[in-house]
Each structure stands twice: as C-alpha cells, then as structure tokens.
Image: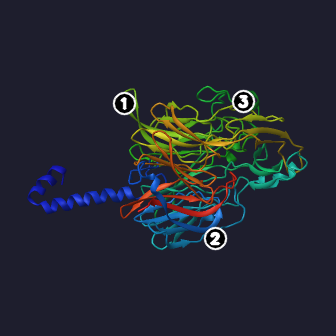
Amino acid sequence: MNIRTKYIASLKYPCIFLLLLITACSSENDINADWPLYGRDYSNQRFSPLKQISTQNISKLKLAWSYKTGKKATFQTNPIVIDGIMYITTPFNDVIALNAETGDEIWRYEHQLTGENFCCGPANRGPAVANGVVYTATIDARLIALDQKTGNVLWDIEIKDPGVNTNEREILESLSGVEGFDTAVQVGASGYSASMAPQIYDGKVFVGITGAGYGLHLEVEEGGRQKLSVGGFAGGGHGLRGFLVAYDAKTGEEVWRWYSVPEKGWEGEWKETTANGMPLNRDITKEKSKFEKNKDAWRYGGGSIWSTPAIDHELGLIYFGTGNPSPNLEDGSRPGDNLHTCSLVALDIKTGELKWYYQQIPHDRWGYDVASPPILFKLKKEGKIVRAVGQASKVGWLFIHDAETGELLIRSDPWIEQDNLFAPPSEAGARVVPGTIGATSWSPVAIMPETNTAYIAGIYQPSVFHSVKLEAQPRQPWDSYSYFKQTDEPDWGVFSALSLNTGKILWQTKVDNPMVGGALATAGGLVFTGEGNGRIDAFDAENGELLWHHNADYGVNAPPISYAVNGKQYVAVAAGGSKVFGYKTGDEILVFALDD
C-alpha cells in the first residue's frame, strides 16, 4: 500500500490510519534506537540520529549505570546494542551480554586462550551481531560464533595458527651491549592475531589478521622514564603475511581470502615519491640490486588489517586499510613498493577480487599503517553527487577518494604539525613528526552528515628514528636494527573538525594527552570523545565548545556509542585505558543519560 492509498483508506477507516501511523513511527524509532554495527551502519559514520540529548540539555547528563568486567587491561570494545541488549568484548576475549537499560549481566562467554604469547596485547575492539549470532575474533586468531540468547558456542574456527610467529622473540639477545637496551623489556612482536570487530554482510563474516608486521616492541628505561621503542631487523625472513578473509556466517566455512601482499608484482613501480609528490628518500638503485636475493619477501611481507571495514552495497565493494610492510621500519630485505601495504583497498564483496587500491606510503619505513576505519559519504564535486570514501591517515591527512574508482578527490589540511616527514633513520637519530604512533592511530572517525563534517582524534608526539649496525651472530642473519623512540618533548592530543567538502579544518581543540579511542556524533548537535586521563568530553559539533565532561577512574580510550531503550537515549563508552599509550588500565563500561 503506497502513501496515497493509506491516506484514502484513513478517511474511511480513521482507526486503521492511526494504527498505521503509530506502527510507522514505532518502526522508525526502533531502527534509530539500536547501535547494531561497529560504525552503527555500513558507512562507518558513527552518527546517531538520536537527539534527546542535545546542546541545550547536555549539562544534565549523568551516569545512569556502570559495569565492571573484572578484566583490567587495555579496553577498546565498541558495544553493540540491539533490542535493549548490549554486547561487549573484554581484553583477552570474553564476551558479555548486558541489559542496556540497567547494566544487569545476562550471560558471559569466558574465552580459553590457546597459548601464552600474543603479538599485540590483549585488546579487542568489539563483537558483531546478526541473525541470532554473536561473532568475536580473538587474540589467539580464532573466529567464534555464539548463540545470541545464551552465549553458548555454535562454532569455533582457527583463522591462522597463532604459534606460527617469527624469530623476533629471540632477537633481543642481539641487542646485548647496545647502548640503551640493557633494561629493555619485550612487550610485543610479530605473530598472527585478531583484534578487530568483525563485519557482517550478505551471509558472510569478514575478519582481518593482525600482527603480520608488528616488529619488535620494547619498553626501554631512560632517565627514569619508560619509553616505547618500536623497531625491526633487516634480513632473517621474519614477519608474516596479512589477509582479510570472508566466512559463511552460518557454518564458518571459508568463502574467500585476500592477501595484502601479492605473490607476484609486490615490488610495484619503484616509486620515489608519494602520490602527491613528497620524496620518500629511497635508494632505488640499491633496492633493485637486492631484489633477486629477496624475491620471496612477499611470503612474510606484512600488511595487517586492524579495523572494521566499510561496505557500499550498491557498488558491491568492501573497504579497509592495510598495515605496514614487514620487517617493520627496516627495508634492507624488502625492496620495492611492498604492495599492497599501507593502502586503502576496495574488494568485490562477493569474490574478494581487488577492484582498486591507493597506497599512501610506498615502501613504508615509518610504521604509518592505514589503521583508522574508512568512512563512506556523499560528496558534491563539479556539480555532481559522488559516492566517496575517506580515511584518516597516520601521516596527518584525510584522504578522500571516489568510492567506485579510487581516484583521489581531496587531501585535507594536516591536523597536526608535520616535520621532517619521511626522513630516513640515522645512527644519531632523525626527529620525525608524526612519530611512529602517527597523527591518529586506529581511532574511528565520526561524521555529521548534515554538514559533512568529520571529527578526528589526533596525536602530537615527536619520535626519533635511529638505525644501528649489529654484529652478525650464528643463526642470526640480521645485521641492522632500525627503531623509533619517544623524545623528552611534551606531547598532546588534538581533536579536530574537518570539512569533507573542502578538506579544510573548521575547528580544533587541544587536550592534555595524545588521543586514541575515536568519536561519536549525534543529531543533538554533539560530538563525544574520550581522553587518556579519564575524561569523557562532549563538544558542540558546530564550534568545538566544550559543553560537558565526566571524569572516569581509567583512561577513556575506546569509541563512544549512543542508543535508546524505552524512549530514553543513552551514551556508552568503555573506560579501561591503554598500556601502549601509558594510560591507566581498568575494566568499566560507563553509560550516561539525562537526569530525570
């Protein structure tokens, strides 16, 4: 029945018309009430159409309930809320269902890890829920399907053997006697893992592998302060090969698998500059002389996939970013462009066929993963509406592409200072900004669709890029080690609003600490984000004025969401800090609502 027919019928049967109207409104409200996907919808815009909480009443926002998981560690979960039930994941991969109105626990799945050493820490970025099933990817590289009502395991499959890691775990011995590394403690190395929230579409579950080019992560004491050192070794065949895999959502059977680094052609075009002409300081002649010796480097070429993909169902494409090549930071044994690492990638969602890619950093040496999730939106270009895909890069630009072809349409203004970008390492050390953590990390961007404004959690943290020569030892073929280390300079965070129409910065707010966790925009004219010091902030989306904040006990380094139950709007976020960033770790889900 079309709208005109409904109207005519209503004249004769007013009660039926009233019922239809109520049903229509109820249906719309139910759709708006949920947060059913990682980015709320397949565009990854992280925009809630709810507007009960607004710029006018945000001062009345109070803590409605909280829940402690009992797992105090880096906490990055993105809650999913469907029909009044909230689903979260914890560090070390428990999954919990909660009453989204009260915080009461409904069920809990406790994950038994297969092994002890995992590449990249305990964090997980959330579950996915569809068709009566809750899906979770684990740090021991498994994909698990749980019954949505009970939490019982339906099936459990291995994405990749997590024990197939690399000899980086033995490399620390090579650094004995190297100044500054006598107190080094290893906190991570390459190894198959999975931390992203899976994506679900058209009967398939999509998940990417991480840790493929993680390098050797160390904590080094210097001047009484613990600093993070991230490095890699040339040679030795260490590193792994990243991939995205699609599974049948009902059975867990593999449908297709796409590898980040191709078996043939991975050397690319030997580009001396980025696509926008910035020199990469490569010695192409030297690289080409090493190609024959290293022609099998694709086998362990890196390209982790850290974040949940976006999907354009009309184009039939799935979009995601790939990580740095392996070895991380060291390029002696991986000549060429190292395709398709450090790229925004579009695949055919049915077959996994590569449709296009945009490599932000050919032959990356700086750990500039394409880590923040891509976002889909509409853009007016030369009088036409264009389907666009954007990605907030670690180098500090938002790249905006034609979603169908990959053509670069806009490169935004940088939202932090860029200094000595793409400088090579040296024994004395080269100061580089953005540093190895990047101008933004994995933090998801939020969009205000009405104004086409993007909100980005940014980082200012200079690093020094070093290279040292090592004496060759038996069974240790590496001969050099390149690494980033934090400086003693002050660092901070920058929360930025950028126009997606022009790429220009609209406003910025400086915060005390480098930002990680992401943003949420709402129809109430608000944008929410968290800080490492435990603050949860709400800004006026139009001008950046801070309108509200709450002080949590732990770092707020996870993406906020918003949902409604029984007509009441809530804002929820995990407060559990980040070990990598040095923010106090904890185990709380915090949920806020207007004070009645």
Depth check: give the residue in front, 382 or 461.
461
Q: Earlier in the sequence, mark 3 or mark 2?
A: 2
Q: Give how far across and how far down residue 496 sits, in percent.
A: 54, 39
> Is residue 353 visible to the viewer in this orientation of the structure?
no
Q: Which residue is mark 2?
A: 112
- Kindly identify the amino acid type of the residue bearing the numbered disc 2: Gln
Look at the numbered disc 1 and give the secondary structure of its residue.
Answer: strand
Q: Which mark is residue 384?
A: 1
Look at the numbered disc 2 and give the secondary structure of its residue.
Answer: loop
- The residue located at (61%, 57%) in the rendering is 194
Q: Earlier in the sequence, mark 3 or mark 1?
A: 3
Q: Compute the Cα span from label 3 to label 1.
A: 39 Å
Q: Which residue is mark 3?
A: 282
Q: Are marks 3 and 1 in contact (CB under 8 Å)?
A: no
Look at the numbered disc 3 and give the secondary structure of its residue.
Answer: loop
- Foreground label between 3 and 2: 2
Neighbor class of circle 1 (other Cα within 10 Å; few <14, some 14-19, many 20+) is: few
Neighbor class of circle 2 (other Cα within 10 Å; few <14, some 14-19, many 20+) is: few
